[in-house]
Image (spheres, rainbow, N blue to C red):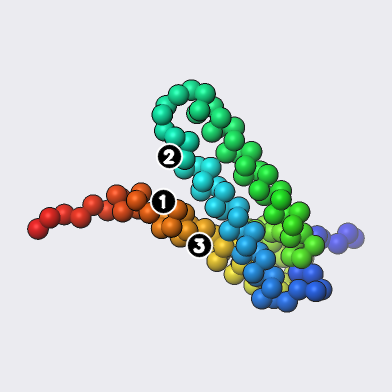
Amino acid sequence: MQAIPTTGIGTEMTGFGGAVVESAITFMLVYTVYVAADPGGGGGDGKRKRKMRREVAGPLAVGLTAGACVLAAASLTGGSMNPARSFGPAVVSGNFKNHAVYWVGPLIGAALAALVHQYLVFPSASSDAYPTSAV
């Protein structure tokens, strides 16, 4: 019988350190997805060339970021960046050791990426979404 490949933190890592690493790489990936999917990020001038560059550059940036994050964190935490990616093999193998790292880290990293994109990088877009009414 073959062993089921599950993600696990390295021997030199603690649970807190693993959660920080997973949080950082998830932040990078999710922030890249937000920027790549932002319709205002490409200039919005409607020219075909610019639209074509954005359609090619966005997925390429996301793929390169995901690859770089996995290469950077594979020896430390397995570079999961997704709770479901770690949960499935853990269910099948029955090995849930240090599994909170793969839930806490990515959830915090993704939430921070959303907050940074929404309120620090593009704050005017969020204020336009809820216009105030004069009384």
Q: Is residue 55 above or below residue 91?
A: above
Res 27 seen here: yes
The residue drawn where x is 76% and y is 73% is: 13
Residue beneath label 3, please?
111
Percent coordinates x, y for residue 31 in the rendering:
54, 52
If you read the primary sequence from the N terminus, does the residue marked by circle 3 or circle 1 appear first? 3
**Residue type highlighted by circle 3:** Ala
CA gap between label 2 and label 3 equals: 21 Å
Q: Earlier in the sequence, mark 2 or mark 3?
A: 2
Q: Residues within 10 Å of mark 2 (few under 14, many from 20)?
A: few
Amino acid type, callout 2: Gly
SS for dot 2: helix
Is 60 left or right of 47, judged from the image as shown?
A: right
Residue contact at pointers 2 and 1, CB within 8 angstroms: yes
Q: Residues within 10 Å of mark 1 (few under 14, many from 20)?
A: few
Q: Residue at x 54, y 60 (%)?
A: 110
**Can you say whether 80 is above or below 55 in the image?**
below
Per the image, the residue denoted by label 1 is 122
Distance of label 3 from label 1 (alpha carbons):
16 Å
In the rendered image, which quarter contains the N terminus?
Answer: bottom right
Is residue 7 in sight in this rendering? no
- Residue, disc 2: 40
Res 134 label: none
